[in-house]
Image (cartoon, helix red, strand yellow):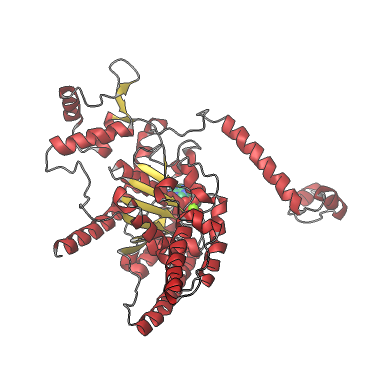
Amino acid sequence: MKSAGKTTLPPYFNIDPDEALAALGDPTTTSSFSTISDACGRGRSDLESRGINPDGQRKLRLFSTWEITRYLIPVAQAHFRRVLKANPDLPQGQSETEGGAKWFTLDEVLKLRAHFGVEGSKAKEYLPYRPENVPAKMVAVANFKGGVGKTSTAAHLAMSAALDGYKVLIVDLDSQGSMTSIFGGKVQDEWQTVFPLLARHYAGYQRSENQRRLDRGDAPIPLEETLSEALQVKAQDLVQETHWPNIDLIGAQLNLYWAEFQIPVWRMQGRGWKLWEALTESFEQDGILDEYDLIFLDTPPALGYLTINGLTAADILLVPLGASFLEFDSTGRFFDMLHTTFQSIEEGENLAARALGRDEISFEWDAVRAVVTRYDSTQQAELAALMQAYLGQTLSPHRQDYTALIGQAGEQVQGIYEADYRDFNRETYARGRETFDATYAAFKTLFIGAWRRDELAKAQG
Ligand SMILES: Nc1ncnc2c1ncn2[C@@H]1O[C@H](COP(=O)(O)OP(=O)(O)O)[C@@H](O)[C@H]1O
Ligand SMILES: [Mg+2]
């Protein structure tokens, strides 16, 4: 009994100070961080060298006839096969066994969809709604809390939209670069992120200020080297292709964090610079908004300058949060911070605008929606219902279920849409997919509605 009493004592009692000292090791210095980071780097290369694809390139899986006719192109399987047979020029797919199921690349699926769009019944939605001559919709996914599902939600929505036939650009504004990893992006330094676009926008402002100085007879202020260099950069130079044929990426890596220090310095030097217009205007100038249908901005877990830029660039703002007290509470404070931040920008601008007799600014979004992520109906129904009651329309109607498949899918495969359904029980797969399809449907309703509003406004002149 004596020994039993000893073993039931919690582990934090009777820690021997000398043993603790022996286990402690030498104090950590700044250079230790470099040793640790080198070790991580070597481990990473080791992991990479064991990768499924030895060249480190991601490859998107193939899509079966079942999946295409079930989820992507709304036709009966028999009709799908008849159309392929009648049109030998169309992609015919490949099968693993003689006469086995046919599998297609996403590129081939897109070609088939285009064919059905032109030749098929006009009563069916083969091609997704996209009014002509209206710009891409920009969507920011933001919340200053980390781990709420921003990146997962943005990645899944981007993939849903791509499968649905839209042309998608993803912009990673998080210097942690999770989104960039998901899409296999390679980014050397901040010059391959959005940083040069922000710098270019500021440089443009400086140049127009210099013109004003010249007009007044004052000497212009020479542009810093960074800024002159940024003037040469086009958004298209930053865009990289991904393993998804219709998803492109502007990636991020650690150096992008530098922008959080540089932007306030520029703001100090050029008080009239509208930093919140930097991203939108750069994309507009380079025609990016005409090249894509949807642009997703994944933001860092902070309300810094990059996030503010993303939020003001966005037409639609999605705020993911879990149905827990802590996340509900902190999301409430996030909205409060949004209010304070944008109100102070508006007030600052409008003070000057009124003095100069110019139009006042007022930020506006097509839609702002909170989205419940990682939802567990057995534990969180009550809290979710309460959130619904208080948030009303601001809370998106579909709760994105917690899906173990997401964690299980593995390193080479990111999320439900990249997973091969044959690796799972068909029922499990269908349920996991259903919740992300429903999240997409709720989001699609938003951007379709917003595009329709633009289209009608355009028609009215
Ligand atoms: N619907 C979901 N089901 C299960 N796990 C999820 C789901 N959504 C996100 N996760 C997991 O939660 C963690 C945090 O998600 P992430 O998207 O990286 O959040 P954030 O970008 O807000 O920091 C990740 O490990 C992710 O795999
Ligand atoms: Mg993230």
Q: Residue furthest top?
A: 98
Answer with the quarter of the image where residue 448 lies: bottom left
Q: Nearer the viewer, residue 428 or 183?
A: 183
In the picture provided, is 331 more to the left or to the right than 40? left
Residue that appears at 25% across and 26% down: 91
Q: Residue furthest front?
A: 217
Q: List x then y, in percent, for residue 437.
A: 32, 46
Q: On the rendered image, what quadrant is the C terminus found in?
A: bottom left
In the picture provided, is 343 more to the left or to the right than 65? right
Q: Nearer the viewer, residue 217 or 127?
A: 217
Number of marks present in the image shown: 0
Q: List x then y, in percent, for residue 457.
A: 18, 64
Can residue 52 be seen in this snapshot? yes
Residue that appears at 29% across and 51% down: 290
Q: List x then y, in percent, for residue 289.
A: 32, 53
Can residue 292 be seen in this snapshot? no
Q: Nearer the viewer, residue 221 or 125?
A: 221
In the picture provided, is 270 more to the left or to the right than 70? right
Answer with the quarter of the image where residue 357 lies: bottom left
Q: Residue furthest right?
A: 18
Q: List x then y, in percent, for residue 205.
A: 44, 66
* Residue 325 to residue 413: above or below: below
